[in-house]
Amino acid sequence: MFFWNIAMGDGNSIRTLKEFYIPDYILVPGAKTESVSHIPACPVIVFINGKSGGQLGGELLVTYSSLLNKNQVFDLGLKAPDMVLHQLYATLENFKYRGDNFAAEIQKRLRIVVAGGDGTASWLLGVISDLKLPQPPPVATVPLGTGNNLPFAFGWGKKNPATDRSSVISFLNQVKDAKEMKIDSWHIVMRMRAPKEGSCDPIAPLELPHAMHAFNRVSSTDKLNVEGYHTYRGGFWNYFSMGMDAQVSYAFHSERKLHPEKFKNQLYNQRTYLKLGCKQGWFCASLFQHSRNIAQLTKVKIMKKQGQWEDLHIPHSIRSIVCLNLPSFSGGLNPWGKPNRKKSIYRDLTLPFVDDGLFEVVGFRDAWHGLALITPNGHGTRLAQASRIRFKFHKATADCTFMRIDGEPWKQPLPLDDDKVVVEISHHGQVSMLATPSCRSKSVHDPSSHTVDNEEEDSSDEESSENFEERRKFGAAHTFKYTDGSDIAHLS
């Protein structure tokens, strides 16, 4: 009955794969109910961005479909995950209501595998959060992108994986043995007036990353609830960044969109990224254009837990700012590091945890500053830890800046007159990830996480009741659809 599609599988492989298998009557609406005697230990649903990793995404689709029920494996270019999970959980709830114990166990034990870049993984996390699923499944990430910060943070590695049968079976066994780990979800709301002219015209919703979704119904109490303003919302689980690092990322994504045939392997992608960093002036201020620091562009306020808004001072040397949730940025580096305990007493800084309701705010002067992360005890400029942050952009010396969330960059127009752009980040629940024993992320509830070596001396230097409508979802499920002809390759 199981795995008739495995022509070359031996007995051990079949016994192993039975632990991940889900029968058709659970997956296909209207399929004939089957009598099942074996309950799988780790039933999985697999989502793969077929355009990620050059040809690797397509190869993984073939391998997973041959090892599992093909109806467990979905190409994200053909099937949206919100539709898949909505249908699956509706079916499971229906069978549970009819007393089907097998369906109840599938729902209880279900795990999600997502193969793609950080943008793809964040998309899935947003969908799971928005659907408000009963017993939301934990997620394991296959590193198919360029940076692969999300997979690396939870021990899944950052190199693109092998796609042969034995490698995929080994990965599935890791998924089965992985532990669940809660991490904070961060909601981002951006309100702005669409510019009528300028270098960023037009700024249509489709020009923003897929993680940001148009949302025009604004609370009547919102001061920006006036004609001509647009609201966008989204979520992130790793980082939000603004400035020079996002500008380099935007140049990379633009180049890849123009010449997708060149970006077929991870090593080439990383080399191109480095070249663009040099060209864009990330290693030194460009001789051809004025390099603006963050303080020139925006005023920043933060809220520490449930406190009051306070101004955040940004040194004038800072050209990039990062709001970081996980200890993995720019290919697995940790910008926050491990603050010296003695200094953290009076600086009110703690170790970074992924489930403490706080994100770390870090600044960088340039790429040379970023390279310090490679050295022992290296870190960026630690600015704050906060539960909320608000960026207000008024008429500035530039007509645009660059922003990025979980690997997806965009070119953000800035006000040219008396208008303003507001970007606000706040806590919005938690999701469950799957972590291997080599996981780098730390939980505030894990006693072992509080025991670390001190680093060397550091050489660097009112609205809690708000309940905006747009804060209730990330916009990833139902409210978001791919348009005809849209390309998901940039999510790799």
Image: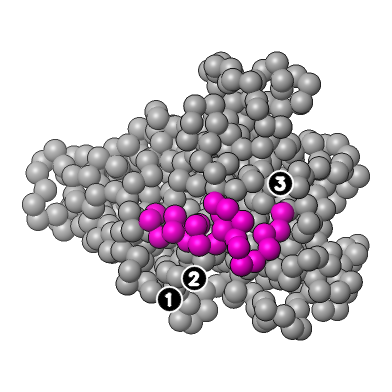
Provide the residue span drawn in magenta. Answer: 270-293
Q: Residue 282 sits in which quadrant?
A: bottom right
Q: Residue at x 18, y 49 (%)?
A: 165
- Counting from the top left corner in percent of width and height, residue 404 is at 60, 58
- Counting from the top left corner in percent of width and height, residue 454 is at 58, 17
- The residue at which mark 1 appears reads as 258
Category of crowding for the residue at label 3, using alpha-carbon neighbours closer than 10 angstroms: few (below 14), some (14–19), many (at least 20): some
At mark 2, the secondary structure is helix
Q: CA distance from mark 1 to mark 3?
A: 33 Å
**Residue type pointed to by label 3:** Ser
Q: Residue at x 59, y 20 (%)?
A: 456
Is residue 462 rendered magenta in the image?
no
Q: Is residue 213 left or right of residue 121?
A: right
First-in-chain label (1 vs 3): 1
**Residue type pointed to by label 2:** Ser
Q: Residue at x 55, y 62 (%)?
A: 280
Is residue 292 rendered magenta in the image?
yes
At mark 3, the secondary structure is loop
- The residue at which mark 3 appears reads as 317
- The residue at which mark 2 appears reads as 254
Quarter of the image containing the C terminus? bottom left
Q: Is residue 440 left or right of residue 403?
A: left
